[in-house]
Structure formats: structure tokens, C-alpha cells
Amino acid sequence: MTTIRRFDLDNQGLARVLGELEAKILEGVWELGQPTVKDMTAWLGPDVHAKTIMTVMNRMVEKRLLTRKLRGRHFVYAAVLDRESFLRQVASQVLSGLLADFESPTIAHFVEGATPEQLAELERLIAARRTRPEES
């Protein structure tokens, strides 16, 4: 399981929880499949340096965001989780933390800020949860 250690309110998307370069790299890995550092550097564009990308990708391996395997003379990298699973884990960890620390304001803001479509989805999920047997 990926552990979220940061949440940057001033950023957007994955950069809120990973940082900008890690977020771009993870997006690139999801798009490319199993890129090498050279593949990722090309995908990110001319303003990045291969050595920087290699360092960050290896740190992402240490953080268990990516895996690394030797293929021929080069390492290929892959995401530990697919995009949907990763986003589900991030949302779960962030919301669990907010609910633990700020229960009432979090729930109130969640409901007040929801669109009619989101409220309908929330109602559907609540109804499904109420009919599910209690988990122990």
C-alpha cells in the first residue's frame, strides 16, 4: 500500500500528494507502460535531464510507487498500482485523515459542495452501504 505523506493545497492533481516531477513521471509511466529512463526523459521533453529523472524514478522505487527490472542493458520501470487503484488509495487516505481530525466540517463540506449528480451518487452509495451486512 502506498502511504501518502504530504498534501499540498496549492497544487493540483497528483502533484498535491507526490510533488510535480513525481506526478509527471507517474503519469508518464501509466501512459508508456514500462519505460526506461531514456523513454521517460523523451516523454517529459527537452527541459529535463536524464540523471535527474533516473534519481527521481529510483526514489519512487524506494517509496514503492514504481518497480524496476533489468531488461537487457537498461532498467524498465512500471507503476505498482494502476491509475484507478492509486487514486482510490489516495482518496481513502486523505479522507480518512480529514474525517479523523475534522469529522463534522469534512462531512458538512462534502455534502454542501457536492453537485446534484454527486449527491445522487452519494445517496446511492449510502443506500448500498446500509443494506450491506456489518463488517467486523
Image (spheres, rainbow, N blue to C red):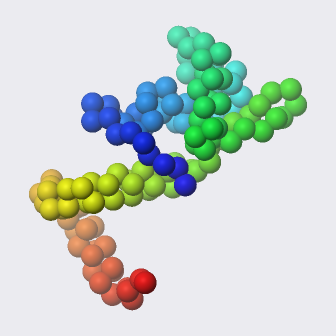
Mark yes or no: residue 111 visible. no
Q: Which residue is drawn at 43% across and 30% down?
A: 19
Above or below — where is 78 with respect to 125? Answer: above
Quarter of the N terminus within the rendering: bottom right
Q: Where is residue 86 in the image (x, y as percent from the top left)?
A: 50, 50
Q: Nearer the viewer, residue 43 or 8?
A: 8
Q: Residue at x 72, y 38 (%)?
A: 68
Q: Which residue is drawn at 53% across and 11% down?
A: 47
Give the number of callouts. 0
Quarter of the C terminus within the rendering: bottom left
Task: Place residue 62 in its image quadrant.
Answer: top right
Mark yes or no: residue 26 visible. yes
Does 47 sit left or right of 104 as displayed? Answer: right
Q: Where is residue 83 in the image (x, y as percent from the top left)?
A: 51, 48
Does 64 sit left or right of 123 as displayed? Answer: right
Residue placed furthest toward the front? 101
